[in-house]
Image: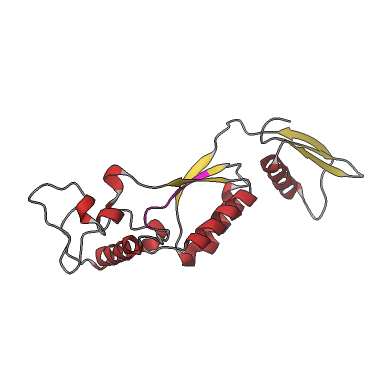
Amino acid sequence: VAVDGYELSVTEEQTLIRASNLRGFIYGAETIAKLLQNGLLPVCEIADHPAMPWRGAHLMIPSRENIPFFKRVIKYILSPMGYNFIILQISAGMEFKRHPEINEAYVTAARKGREGIWPPFPHDCVADGQFITQEETRELVAYCRSLGIEVIPEVQSLGHVQFMTIAHPEIAELAEDAPRYDPNAVDARE
């Protein structure tokens, strides 16, 4: 059986899935679910495997309120379609235990951007401008893996770290005449 592939054999007496790995088994089980009509399976032989080794999507870490929706997307869309990885954009959407000021500044900047007090904050859609705990993140990763989907964390770098520089302006490279961050002022930087 090919990598991530399966062989399905349905006879009058039994149904067998032979798979190369967990993903192959999941794909075989998904095929059974699609074939099932009124509690019956048609007699058939199917051998299938994905055409490409990498099948993925780029998602943003969800807000706490959207974790159930995120899980439904994984379970009912990505896994049945044969995706085997997601790139999960983290930014400040996950709790930084050793630097909580990053999360706090991100939440404030996202809120002020949405209220029109500041210009829209970059990547404020990550976790809907909030953040989830490290434990919630671990649980999401475990859930994805249980459905055969690996998670590749995407942590922004270089020009995409406003979530860090808003909390630590001393690490930002700004023009000499650029305004400095003042949590009580309008942030005019784009």
Residue ID at (75%, 46%): 32
Residue found 69% across the figure and 30% down from its top: 2
Residue nearest the observer in this picture, 124 or 176: 176
The magenta-colored residue range is 86-92
Asked if residue 34 lies left or right of residue 185, the reply is right
Q: Looking at the figure, which quarter contains the N terminus?
A: top right
Q: In the visual, does 89 lie left or right of 190?
A: right
Q: Nearer the viewer, residue 36 or 126?
A: 126
Q: Is residue 49 left or right of residue 164?
A: right
Instruction: State the image quarter where residue 11 is shown.
Output: top right
Figure colour scheme: secondary structure
Is 142 magenta? The answer is no
Q: Nearer the viewer, residue 189 or 27?
A: 189
| Residue furthest out toward the front | 98
Q: Residue furthest left?
A: 177
* Residue at left offset 38%, top offset 60%: 98
* Residue 128, position as x, y percentages in the image: 39, 62
Q: Quadrant of residue 8?
A: top right
Name which residue lies at 80% across and 55% down: 38
Residue 48 on image: x %, y %: 70, 34
Image location (x, y in percent) of residue 31: 72, 44
Q: Exactly how many numbered labels are in the figure?
A: 0
Q: Residue furthest right?
A: 13
